[in-house]
Image (cartoon, coloured by chain):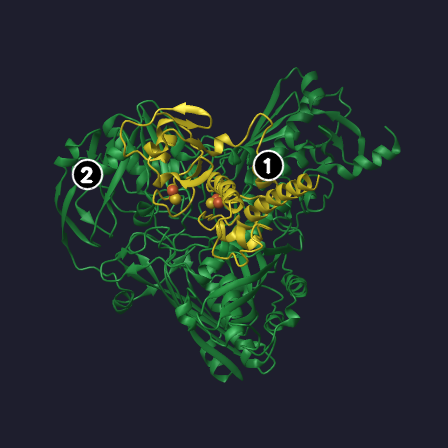
Chain colours: A yellow, B green
Amino acid sequence: MPIRINGTEASAPADPRVSLLDLLREDLHLFGAKKGCNQGACGACTVLVDGQRVLSCLTLAVQCEGRDVTTVEGLADEHGLHPLQRAFIEHDGFQCGFCTPGQLCSALGMAAEFERGVPSVVTVDFEDYGADLTLEEIRERMSGNLCRCGAHNGIIAAIAEVQNSRQDQDKKEAAA
Amino acid sequence: MSAANNAGTLAAAVGLAANSWGQGERPDPLNRHKHGLVGTSISRIDGPLKVQGKATFAAEFLMEGLTYASLVFSTIAKGRIATLDASAAEAAPGVVLVMTYKDAPLMKPMPLFMTAEKAAGGDNLPIMQDDQIHWNGQPIALILAETQEQADYASSLIHATFEAEPSVTDFEDAKRQGTKTGEFGGGPLKLDIGDAEAALNQAAVSIDAEYSTPRHSHNAIEPHAATVVWDGDSLVVHDASQAVVHTAWSLSSVFGIDEGQVHVTSPYVGGGFGSKTLWQHQVLGAAASKLSGRPVRITLSREGVYRMVGGRSQTEQRVALGADQDGHLKAIIHTGVVAMSRQNALPEPFILATRGAYAAESFKLHVEVAQLDMLANTFMRAPGEAVGTFGLECAMDELADKLGIDPVELRILNEPDKHPTEGKPFSSRNIVEAWRTGAQRFGWAKRSAKPAAIRDGDWLIGMGCATGTYPYYRMPGGAARITLTREGHARVEIAAHEMGMGTATAHVQVTADRLGLTADQVTFSYGDSKMPGAVLAGGSQQTASIGAAIVAAQHALVTQLLILAGNSSPLAGLKPEEVGGLNGGLAELANPGRHESYASILGRAGRDEVAVQQDAPPPLELQNWSMHSYGAMFCEARVNAITGETRISRFLGSFDCGRILNAKTAASQFRGGIIMGLGLALMEETQFDSRNGRIMNPSLADYHVPAHMDVPEIDVIWNDIPDPHTPMGAHGIGEIGITGTAAAVANAVFNATGKRVRELPLTLDKLM
Ligand code: FES
Ligand code: FES
């Protein structure tokens, strides 16, 4: 079965040992996902598989057969950059930009996890869960994505801004 | 044009800056200019590319017939390779080449960084030329294969045995073998003024303590990588580099070819922090490409970076301060020993900041070196100051505590009126103002002078402060080309670097203001050794170096334009210093209504473009002035009384760094330095096995850097006072943030707990 990558079908590699990251970078020349460690420690290779964030260096490409893979190259659409991409630029959520594709994909996967009700280690109130993705929740949930340039503040601010405006939007729609 | 218009444009006209930076020059007009782009918060111009994953990094250049390299490392610190069996690797699928000392091409050692103008090498050892081993982790074999997986697999099949020789891998052993005075910047790291030991003994109040800092690794998230190909005798290297011209020159020396035969590009760099210079991997990649006749991509594994690319070395520091009852310093003693390899020349110069920090009657500063058989240590963000300010600024806090004087006030009390050990006047030093504004904003007045006085549940809360400082440098070698087109577009080319500092964005702003253009009418090209200049992205000097080169090139450009303008131009008869950039052309400074657009000048002259190239003048400003940046750093720490865990709840950096060119990217630079400083304070350590010289934690899982949860919102402010003696009135700001930060953290932890930790990192075991 083929793998759908940013909407385009690609065939799974013949060698089952090829990681999703190497498939993306070396076979398909999609260099957005980065190899910062190749051992699950930095998050630079984060992509979305069926909307869930995975470390593509620790994922075998063949595991993704029949599934939808979204990389940073797939975030913008015909209307332009994704709101989170725009917020990263506005809040200066990067310097060198090497961790950025992973931060972006991870943030989108993280927001979806939060909305599905997945708690984190700092989640205190399970009753009122889902009311707000606090800055502390975002920091905790994004801690698998390292940034050595020190763009932490801008990254968190960008994620919070997009999340808040989305939640405001949802509330407005619910009220209407 | 109406008078009102005239007045409006008058305010925006930018004359030429003086094209020399010696004593008595008039300040750069951009110092005062408030109407243009300089100082504003424009977003990074490479932002859209970076958020889409479209910026091309070194390991992402495509080439026909590309091969992939993998390396095998020695497992002893010193000795020789006894046997090296590559037969299984050679027979493995996809293998193109196995290269060892037996068949590597003849190459000279790399010119060691700082030993020649364009030297970029991290060490000066033979590279795969013989069977000798110099450090644990030295590459002993390189495998090229059709894919990275095949190369990595084949490298696991190399079988090597070693004959070990006695080695020195223990710091205590190394010290026992004898130390020598460190040399840095052409002189000894030793300074004596008066009799500091006697003054210390006679001082009314004194402290005398030992501080230590461990090894650190830069850990840029982009591992070192190069894509390399030979075209006949010419070498092309797509590198991750903060020194493209230095690297090209050094590689030409290694391979015995002309400098012009090596072309190094580096359009995007995934973080450098001092590590992205020339190390053995680029040389080995080029050698393997030469032997195989194929293009090579050599990407170090994360472990490979730890084995092959040096980091900051360890220091042991003694700081002793003597003061009178009122807190005036009588003696400053800062001495100690650092570990250094035998194949490099950087004794971590931890006394640099101490030379100019405070007024005192006597000084004794001395760095001694103990040599070890280990990977070459190297420059890492604020070499010297990052760890030296830990010792000095903790000691100031200890002295303040003993005197019963507020630590901010003690620092202000000892503010020198000229450089305390060199005697030169300061070009611009407004640290007292930075302290006052910072203290106000941080709420310093709420700090309890008594330690361990504030508790919130299990958490002990304290505040600490420290001075940060880093010198202004400008190295010789700056040059720029400006090409101005008839459409009124300017392209600046300079062999400089963008590792995330915001270089390209800031210099688009500067160039646009100087030439009277808008940001989208300016392109800033960099990261290519074929471009003019030899501009190192190091020592926080790039901004000044580029700035001075652009000033020089603009002088040449305006001179050319006035010649081209000729007698029928409204500008006829004006001299270069009488005109300035305004509204897409040149205008008379005294009468901006007298204006001609670039398009009109070039059109009448029948030219599509005009191009000029000019060298920057030598950095005379450094001869006349003591030039530094400063920061007043404030930290609030929470320490868990039960677990000893430290959390940083607030941090403020209040900076005095000349004129800020781009508020948004500058804030990121400051924060980035501070965050690396939090890592230095709380968690970072390259663990070194003193039995065999092997790094024990060569991975991002075991070497901890600050993650999102470790980093609070960091407040940064600056006074924006231009330095009258620098281009744009600016200072480089890439390193200042990491200085003083570790001491501010340790001092806050002391204030929270009453425990004084003098050994970094400040892990919880030290607070239990
Ligand atoms: S490359 Fe996958 S986590 Fe680092
Ligand atoms: S922006 Fe450089 S590592 Fe995050």
What amino acid is labelled 1 in the image?
A: Pro
Q: Quadrant of residue B484?
A: top right
How would you rate the neighbour count of disc 2 (Cα within 10 Å): few for under 14, some for 14-19, many for 20 or more?
Answer: many
**Residue assigned mark 2:** B100
Position of residue A36 measured from the top left corner of the image (x, y, whole percent): 39, 42
Position of residue B131 measured from the top left corner of the image (x, y, whole percent): 16, 45
Camera-side residue: B176 or B137? B137
Q: Is residue B405 left or right of residue A73?
A: right
Furthest residue in direction right, as rendered: B3
Q: Quadrant of residue B649?
A: bottom right
Q: Is residue B357 left or right of residue A41?
A: right
Disc 2/disc 1 C-alpha distance (Å): 51 Å
Camera-side residue: B532 or B50? B50
Q: Is residue B618 left or right of residue B281?
A: right
Please tell me whether residue A58 is drawn above or below residue B207 in the rendered image: above
Q: Chain of mark 2?
A: B
Q: Secondary structure at mark 2?
A: loop
Please tell me whether residue B27 is drawn above or below residue B406 in the rendered image: above
> What residue do we see at 45% from left, 39% from top?
A52
What amino acid is labelled 2 in the image?
A: Thr
Question: Are callouts 2 and 1 both on one chain?
Answer: no
